[in-house]
Amino acid sequence: MKRKIIAYNLVLTDALEQLDDSFEVEIFDGINPKTDHAFLHALKDAEGIVGLALPVDKELLEKAPKLKIVSNNSTGYNNLSIEEMTQRGVMGTNTPGVLEDTTADAIFGILLAAARRIPELDHFVKSGNWKQHLTTAQYAVDVHHKTLGIIGMGKIGSAIAKRAHFGFDMNILYYNRTRNIEAEGKYNATYCDLEPLLKQSDFVCLMTPLTSETENLMGEQEFKLMKKSAIFVNGSRGKTVDEEALIAALNQKEIHAAALDVYRSEPLSPDHPLLQFPNVVTTPHIGSSTFETELKMANLAVENLLSGLLGQRPKNLINPDVLNR
């Protein structure tokens, strides 16, 4: 009898070609995992799950008695209840070390887009409104030689700092749980507390993981500390920002603009208040969304899955304590 695997929201299913004939793969995309009957039926015999953003909690685990491993096709794994999985002997893995440069390209790209008003002025041209020279009201702001404050100087934050330092001669401040000595040496980044970073930065780029400490890290008080000329960029997770506070800050012109790739609820509804601002760049969570990078991630996710199912220690095991059970 073939061993069952569930592939959930795994866009590039080409990666599943690594699996041999001893595995039966059921693919689910765009379904509600709490109510989809076929998915719930598949859970009963599934030994492995590979995919993106599936909430793996106590409720799901109770419906999957044979489950051995959940392989996340992402660097983040806040969708996994790691403690509950470990107690039940279920391995969890992720795909670090693949998307840093690609995501840094995207986040620095939306920073540039917001500063130079690229989406807004693109629409201006395509709407047939470009009939004379721009007025001063349509002018943008420079990026080069400005101060970039990075909140969360991990691998992606460091990759953004690299682009800012070498490409745009920017002054870099950063706030992190621990000092990043490598970034300080390579990119002349200065470690500081959050308050002075917010007060001094022309661009504030949020790149922290989502934890209980970072949820709503950017709220009303934080936006009030920023310069009125500053641009806020979020490439972390939607819940790290109090969206109502961000909307209020934009309405009250406490900040100049924003560039967002992540949101509290995705996808955004067409009537979401953030979509009403011409000075807010909104991209649909595109951080790692290039064919090359997504395929690398999917391949690594399947490799992790196979290792766990074949009795080996997965390369990117999140909960090593599970091996002692």
Image (cartoon, rainbow, N blue to C red):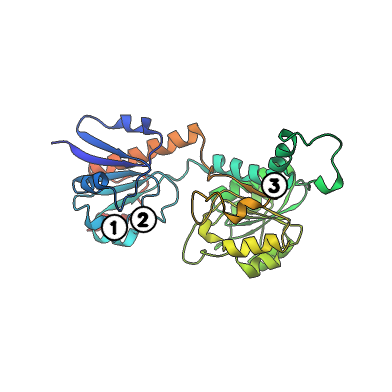
Question: Taking 136 as reference, is 63 left or right?
Answer: left
- Residue that appears at 40% across and 49% down: 53
Name the element at disc 3.
helix
* Amino acid on which the number 2 mark rests in the picture: Leu
Could you tell me if the residues under marks 1 and 2 are in contact, i.e. CB atoms within 8 Å?
yes
* Amino acid on which the number 3 mark rests in the picture: Ala
* Amino acid on which the number 1 mark rests in the picture: Met
The answer to whether any part of residue 218 appears in the image is: no
* Foreground disc of the pair 3, 1: 3
Res 26 → quadrant: top left
Q: Residue 80 got which mark?
A: 2
Name the element at disc 2.
loop
Q: Position of residue 228 (x, y in %)?
A: 76, 61
- Going from N to C along the chain, the mark reached first, 3 or 1, is 1
Q: Position of residue 6 (x, y in %)?
A: 28, 42
Pointer 3 residue = 114
The one of 272 and 56 positioned closer to us in this rendering: 272
The one of 105 and 163 positioned closer to us in this rendering: 105
- Going from N to C along the chain, the mark reached first, 2 or 3, is 2
Q: CA distance from mark 3 to mark 1?
A: 41 Å
Q: Give the position of the C terminus as an image quadrant.
A: bottom left
Q: Position of residue 165 (x, y in %)?
A: 70, 46
Mark 1, other Cα within 10 Å: few <14 / some 14–19 / many ≥20 = many
Pointer 1 residue = 85
The answer to whether any part of residue 286 appears in the image is: yes
Determine whether 271 is above or below 1 in the image. below
Question: Taking 169 as reference, is 78 left or right?
Answer: left
